Image (spheres, rainbow, N blue to C red):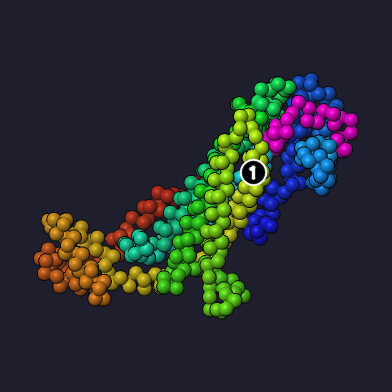
Amino acid sequence: MIPRYTHPEMGRIWSDQRKYETWLQVEVAAAQAMAEAAIVPREAAEEIARCPGVEAARIEEIERTTRHDVIAFTTAVAEQVGPAARWVHFGLTSSDVLDTAQALQMREACDLILAGLARLAQAVRDRAEEHKTTPMIGRTHGVHAEPITLGLKLAIWYAEVLRDIVRVRRAKEVVSVGKLSGAVGTYAHLGPEIEARACLALGLQAAPVSSQIVQRDRHAELLAALAITGATLEKCALEIRGLQKTEIGEVEEPFEKGQKGSSAMPHKRNPIACEQITGLARLLRGNCTAALENVALWHERDISHSSVERVILPDSFIALDHMIRRFTDIVRGMVVHPDRMLENFNRSRGIVFSGTVLLELARRGVSREEAYDWVQRNAMRSLNEGLAFKDLLIADLDVARVLTRQDIEEAFDVRRHLRHVDEVFGRLFGPRIPEVEIRA
């Protein structure tokens, strides 16, 4: 079942009908290349090119007898082409067609993923710029650390999505490779020039060397790129889930009118979309592992990779396309609660400025070890007794000998922590979206 957020085109790319259409594209390109080399009569190649297509249902009907999908396919083509069909699949082995056609499908699917990532990057950038100066507490180990802005958090997401675009584009080039080198890669029946001509017509690179198949390290690289992209989406979704906890309540995924969160508890607004993205990312990683297992095959090939790829390639592309589109909607509709961010920021009673106070003491000649002890004892007292950290520092005799009240007040100015945010944004975004995104 194709998830509702998946673009219909992605489902079509991985349909059986589309698979057979790409097989026919390869057969036509091969026949035309052979005609140019005077191996196949030009009239026969033209007749093959005029084939109106084949129906998946008919191929499946024939396959119930042949138990061989490529033979069922060529039989179905012969029914359409007539006598010229004796030149269909001439000099080819099944993997010549399967691997070359699969490259066309993967390339087409990568283009959809790249377009989706470009839209996601724009959505994240828009929200980052919207909240560039929205202060919130940064957390390390889940514990209050130092001040950040929501925009800075989103800018980090944006930069990672750009890296995903680079990875997927690179993987697309790696898998956009065909081969017509025969049963063991020796070009025993057709020379390399036929492969080169056919691949050029299909817009693919000819593999410089192959066995019966295109080597599966290429496919593993693609699945790794898809899995890493899924991990990026999971990371972002997990952050929203964490910030949507009742105790935090700083950000929420959109909750549509009429939506229900729980069959038993009407008050619930659960981050189900982000949870779904988290779960699907696990599927992508599992598929990547399977792709890595496909790299090692017996001798010039066995068939153990084939059944795996029939699952992991369509599943990974369809799942990731769904994830990208859904997360783009989440980002666009994400509800932000700046008041709750401020409330949470103040909950730790100012101890998040402890590092600034430490540096001010060191700057004025106190040893780091002694300054650390002074600041820590007041921070622990603030935590344990619920007292304002700033007031404790002002009343501390050791601290007061070194820092004035004004010094301490200035150390607690959040603007001091956020003064470089504009510079970071300028460095990342610049005057326009980076070229890597435009070309996606």
Q: Is residue 255 above or below residue 23?
A: below
Q: Mainly helix, strand or loop, the magenta region?
A: helix
Q: Residue at x 69, y 48 (%)?
A: 14
Amino acid beneath label 1: Glu
**Residue most toward the right?**
83
Q: Residue at x 28, y 61 (%)?
A: 416
Considering the numbered disc 1 on the image, is that residue within a helix, a strand or a loop? helix
Q: Is residue 238 above or below residue 28?
A: below
Which residue bears the numbered disc 1? Answer: 309
Q: Percent x, y for residue 93?
A: 73, 30
Using a 10 Å C-alpha cutoff, classify the residue at mark 1 as few (fewer than 14 neighbours), some (14 to 19) or many (20 or more): some
Q: Is residue 123 above or below residue 57?
A: below
Lateral position of residue 201 relative to residue 265, left or right: right
Q: Percent x, y for residue 182?
A: 70, 27
**Residue most toward the front?**
298
Is residue 287 magenta-colored? no
Q: Percent x, y for residue 259?
A: 60, 73
| Nearer to me, 237 or 224 | 224
Q: Could one spot residue 357 in this view of the protein?
A: yes
Magenta segment range? 78-101
| Nearer to me, 147 or 100 | 100
Q: Is residue 341 above or below residue 21?
A: below
Q: Residue at x 55, y 66 (%)?
A: 272
Q: Percent x, y for residue 161?
A: 50, 50
Lateral position of residue 309 relative to residue 220, left or right: right
Quadrant containing the N terminus in the rendered view: bottom right
Q: Could one spot residue 115 in this view of the protein?
A: no
Q: Residue at x 66, y 54 (%)?
A: 7
| Nearer to me, 307 or 346 | 307
Is residue 82 magenta-colored? yes
